[in-house]
């Protein structure tokens, strides 16, 4: 295992153990997923926290201002990562933590591709059906793909349902 992978796994497992032992796994996982999205939209923030030109107290204030409403384990993880100069990997650490949590909570994420946006009700029905079939809690994200021509294509891990017009045409084409 490379040193970077070791750092990411150590930090992720530490947060995972804390969240699990405090029975706050779901809450901390949801908050971590939100932070990942926030950090993707604000890439400069990590550069500021990683800077050697800014004093730690100032960095901690920035962390408290931005994430003070989140669980203390998350805030303290970001502060400690800043102190140990691994904060540039914090989004990857949180991503790995979310993966660990989802595995423990039996949650799987997938995509449903369609030509036009699906309603929340349609997505929920498909999530419920797939949850039963895959014996997991499935969450789907709707992605618009005009190349499908019509129908839908669903992908969860290696599980694929291609009920699109394009998929059917490709199937016919492969038979000829």
Image (spheres, rainbow, N blue to C red):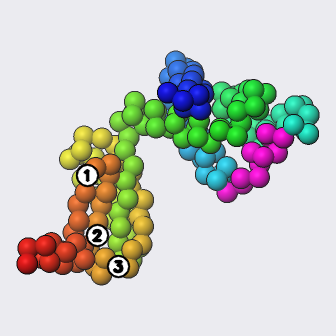
Q: Position of residue 10 (x, y in %)?
A: 57, 24
Secondary structure character of the magenta stretch overall: helix
Q: Secondary structure at mark 1?
A: strand
Q: Please identify the residue farthest to the left as the structure is shown.
A: 176
List x then y, in percent, for residue 33: 56, 44
Up-down: is 92 above or below 22? Answer: below
Between residues 125 and 79, which one lies in front from this camera angle?
79
Q: In the image, which disc is placed on residue 159? A: 1
The stretch in magenta equals 41-51
User: Is 16 drawn above or below residue 150 in the view shown?
Assistant: above
Q: Which residue is tagged 3? A: 147
Task: Residue 52: name its quadrant.
Answer: top right
Q: CA gap, disc 1 to disc 3? A: 21 Å
Label located before the other in sequence (2 or 3) = 3
Element marked by disc 3: helix
In the picture of the structure, the residue carrying the numbered disc 2 is: 152
Q: Quadrant of the C terminus?
A: bottom left
Residue furthest top as drawn = 21
Residue, x 42% and y 59% (percent of image)?
141
Residue 121 in view, yes or no? no
Does residue 48 show up magenta in the picture? Answer: yes
């Amino acid at each position: 295992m490379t040193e970077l992978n070791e750092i990411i796994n150590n930090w992720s497992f530490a947060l995972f153990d804390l969240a699990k032992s405090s029975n706050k796994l779901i809450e901390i996982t949801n908050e971590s997923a939100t932070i990942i999205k926030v950090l993707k939209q604000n890439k400069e923030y990590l550069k500021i926290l990683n800077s050697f030109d800014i004093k730690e107290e100032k960095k901690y204030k920035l962390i408290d201002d931005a994430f003070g409403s989140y669980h203390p384990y998350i805030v303290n993880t970001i502060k400690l990562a800043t102190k140990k100069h691994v904060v540039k990997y914090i989004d990857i650490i949180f991503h790995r933590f979310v993966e660990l949590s989802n595995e423990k909570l039996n949650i799987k994420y997938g995509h449903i591709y369609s030509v036009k946006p699906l309603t929340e009700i349609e997505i929920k029905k498909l999530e419920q059906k797939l949850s039963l079939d895959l014996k997991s809690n499935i969450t789907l994200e709707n992605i618009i793909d005009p190349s499908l021509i019509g129908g839908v294509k669903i992908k969860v891990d290696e599980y694929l349902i291609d009920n699109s017009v394009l998929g059917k045409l490709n199937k016919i084409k492969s038979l000829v």
